[in-house]
Amino acid sequence: MKKTLFVVLITLFAGMAQAQVAFGLKAGLNLTKLDVKDPEVSYESRTGYHAGVFLRGRFDKIGIQPELLLFTQNGDLQSSVFGTAREKFTYVSIPVILKFYPIGGLNIQAGPQFGFLVDGEREYDSFLGSGSQDITDYYKKSDVSISAGGGYDFGFGLGLDVRYNVGIKDINNVANGEEAHSRIFLISVAWNFLR
């Protein structure tokens, strides 16, 4: 077992030695929509942000880029119960993106994104009055999305990404509640310190 693990580690390090490695910071804006299967509820997008770090290994036409991001998701909820409400969520997200480079730095991206809910808050304004409440327990602690998009990695260190994330996991944690799935469009700017 130890010998097998040693061989796997040596192979990985040898592969990384031949790869073009990038490490840096990235940040950007996102528009979030919560797809709720409830005819009594509508959900409108609001702008949020994401920021964090990335590591990329590129092997000729293929690259793999794991990221660690702080991710905010905001939206306006219209409900017969709450009236108008604004929901705000904070996630720690880990995308693991496969990049295909057909020409130069131009790339096509796809991969999973794993999100872990840190907090959630609802600010409401209804016929009963205004206020806010913690809604962290109303949603599951984790989310899984599929990301797809494209971008360009410039030789001098700058990178641009555009992605669309489709949540494949029901994140509603309320008993007998309708399914809810995240939908996120994001634009990112990145800087590679290892160029």
Image: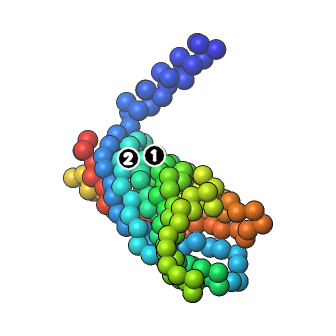
Viewer-proximal residue among 181 and 149: 181
* Residue type of the residue flagged with mark 2: Phe
User: Mark 1 or mark 2: which comes first in sequence?
Assistant: 2
Residue 93 percent coordinates (x, y): 48, 52
Residue of label 1: 66
* Residue type of the residue flagged with mark 1: Pro
Image point (57%, 83%), residue name? 128
Q: Which colour scheme is used?
A: rainbow
Q: Classify residue 57 as left or right of residue 7.
A: left
| Mark drawn on residue 54 | 2
| Quadrant location, the N terminus | top right
Residue 99 percent coordinates (x, y): 46, 53
Residue 114 sits above or below residue 176 on the image:
above
Image point (62%, 73%), residue name? 35
Image point (60%, 17%), residue name? 4
Residue 15 sits above or below residue 68 on the image:
above
Q: Which residue lies furthest to the front in this view?
A: 128
Q: Classify residue 120 as left or right of residue 1.
A: left
Residue 172 percent coordinates (x, y): 67, 63
